[in-house]
Image (cartoon, rainbow, N blue to C red):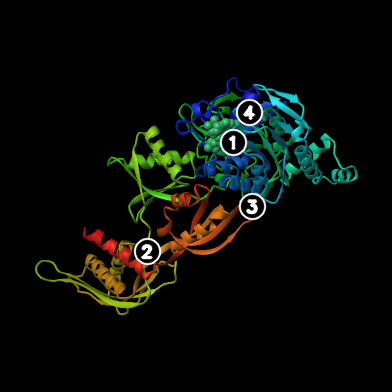
Amino acid sequence: MIESSLFVSGNISRQGKVDEGNTVSDYDPNEIKRKFSINTSIAPLSWKGKKINILDTPGFADFFGEVETAMSVAETGVIVVDALHGVQVQTNRVNNLAQEKKLSRLFFINRLDKEHAKFAEVLSDIQELDSTTTVAAFLPIGIESTFAGIVDLISLKAYEYSEKEAKEIDIPEDLKNEVGENREKLIEAAAENDDALLEKYFDSGSLEEAEIIKGLKAGLRTSNLSLVFCGSASKNIGIATYLDYVAELTPSPLEREEVEGRDADDKEVKIKVSPEAPFSALVFKIVADPYVGKLSYFKVFTGSLSKDQSVINASAKGKHSKQKIAHIFEIKGKEQNEVKEIVTGDIGAAPKLEDVNTGDTITAESNPVSIDIIKLPESVLSFAIAPKSKGDEEKISASLHKIAVEDQTLKFRRDVQTKETVISGMGDMHLEIVIDKLKQRFGVEANLSAPKIPYRETIKGSSSAQGKYKKQTGGRGQYGDVWLRLETLERGKTYEFLNEIKGGSVPSSYIPAVKKGISETMDKGVIAGYPIVDVKVALYDGSFHPVDSSEMAFKIAASMAFKKAFEEASPSLLEPIMNVEVHVPEKYIGDVIGNLSSKRGRVQGTDGTGKYQTVRAQVPLGEISKYAVELQSITHGEGDFTMSFTRYEEVPPDVSQRITAQAKQKEEG
Ligand SMILES: Nc1nc2c(ncn2[C@@H]2O[C@H](COP(=O)(O)OP(=O)(O)OP(=O)(O)O)[C@@H](O)[C@H]2O)c(=O)[nH]1
Ligand SMILES: [Mg+2]
């Protein structure tokens, strides 16, 4: 689509192909290797005297973060639908996001020249995506191998296409009925957006072309209406006419509604897109360019940015200092062209901005507002990552850190409890590409494995026990003696220590050692090697020896007492429970619910209308850590999901026994 648009508009002289790895928008080695987009790329073009910045986003669910950032800086979302496969789960997701962000929406049914291409069916699926009015702007002439051109329902003209140009032809006889019906719907949809037009439409039964355009423009701008175009990008059919309408109908950045932001005092403010206000721009992408280093892509919301101007990172709320802009680039795929200025509404990139991340707002010092509209999706799939060769651990974290600067949907952390580095991402493909990048860019090879589940240990009852550590034969003796009482604590309160010693049976100088003995034991766990939470520990008695007592002896005694009391206080395991939302076509609902129930999931409801439905459930993390892969196979790639941690809950006895037994085995082996 993008390549064709650039070619037809004369912005490139040769049309590349994704399959040949020579397109403007898919230039990353991983994109060329896999033949699909991974990153958003920018392709500006001029058409009919207007500059249009195209942001080419990936379609693959794993890279949804790129769609979020791109849509945050765009006024219009063009949703390309494949004429072979029609509406997919991602189509629905992207459409929902575009609506949420109040973008004007256009659909483009592409690949109509391909065998098995369908038009009417795909159009009606698009119309069912949501309840807003969606009408066809083009109808195809012929289909599959006979696909030859389009009928433009707005101007009521038909076109064939030579290499780049549209050539007007007569509307084919056999299409006249279909054209009539669909044009009627288009005119009605246009009229609905303007009272004067609606009145005229009721009176005369029709509208002039200029009036139709006026109505469509208004409907697109307010997101009450969306239009469906169609064609073939590889044959450039429909593209030139479609571009005409992009230029004519879609809103300019200046027509954008106010956006949400915060001022220097973190108070909510509305920001009006305007050339008059001092400079502010939203950074929506960071690239580690092999030549220029860190490049921050930004979209200007107010004012303009010129070379040598200074900016601050307003999102840092006063924590970072002013930086001077030495260079500004206009970006076209992998090319950077130096420019003097980027004006309101336009997109540019600046090298070497320190302490600036995706989602931050850079502004003139006098206008420290942050534009808070990027909401990155949650990472849903986690793996433990380990180097292939020992000793590369440091290198892996340093390299992951660099990759994560560019890719904010990649999260990684060192789990102190399991002693693993855990990386989380949007799916299998996402993490596979991270592994590739580690190798390509940083020369470090790594393996992924299932991460350990962060269980917790706790107690359901209460108990008291004595811990006495005594060694008084030969040499210097050891003596520590404590009595501890363990009780349950409200979930989430973690730990409380009570010193109930009266009369100095344990001298106060040894209390810190007792506490240390308790906390070290709590970190290590008692029944299965997981940290202990939600217990109240009271030290209520003990004894000491004037010579032999030591901090070490009291620490050991406390640990002994704790273990004994813990084992007698009905110990149990807790597991993380996740809130899960699964989005699937209706036909898979039964399978998805059945599968979730088999995972000890509690289904809480389903909702949604049309082809796609949402299932909401709460499921233990231990059962769902590889759900991304499973859901793919249940729904043949048509489902996706999000999940987030909600709370810890007690593990049922049979599962608990299995985990404890595994832990014992590990300890012994
Ligand atoms: N026959 C035919 N093939 C096309 C047409 N447009 C694109 N293709 C082919 O379809 C495949 C996918 O095209 P892409 O441009 O990578 O599609 P995309 O929507 O960017 O895909 P993602 O990057 O994964 O989101 C490539 O093999 C293209 O050559 C078309 O109009 N007709
Ligand atoms: Mg692509």
Point out residue 607 in the picture as x, y percentages from the top left corner. 60, 59
Give the distance between the C-alpha atoms of the residues marked 2 and 1, in whole angstroms: 44 Å
Q: In which quadrant will I find the N terminus?
A: top right
Give the distance between the C-alpha atoms of the residues marked 1 and 3, in whole angstroms: 23 Å
Give the distance between the C-alpha atoms of the residues marked 3 and 4, in whole angstroms: 42 Å
Looking at the rendered structure, the secondary structure element under dot 1 is strand
Q: Which residue is under mark 4?
A: 5
Q: Please tell me the numbered disc located at residue 218.
A: none
Q: Which label lies toward us, 3 or 4?
A: 4
Image quadrant where residue 135 sits: top right
Q: Earlier in the sequence, mark 3 or mark 4?
A: 4
Point out residue 265 in the picture as x, y percentages from the top left corner. 61, 50
Q: Which residue is under mark 2?
A: 456
Q: How many marks?
A: 4
Q: Nearer the viewer, residue 66 or 467?
A: 66
Q: Nearer the viewer, residue 129 or 45?
A: 129
Q: Please tell me the numbered disc located at residue 298.
A: 1
Q: Earlier in the sequence, mark 2 or mark 4?
A: 4
Q: Of the residues shown, which amino acid type is indicated by label 3?
A: Lys
Looking at the rendered structure, the secondary structure element under dot 4 is helix
Looking at the rendered structure, the secondary structure element under dot 2 is strand
Q: Which label lies toward us, 4 or 1?
A: 4
Q: Please tell me the numbered disc located at residue 267.
A: 3
Considering only vertical position in the picture, is 432 above or below 160?
below
Give the distance between the C-alpha atoms of the residues marked 4 and 1, in whole angstroms: 23 Å
Q: Of the residues shown, which amino acid type is indicated by label 1?
A: Phe
Q: Earlier in the sequence, mark 3 or mark 2?
A: 3
Q: Earlier in the sequence, mark 2 or mark 1?
A: 1
Q: In which quadrant will I find the C terminus?
A: bottom left
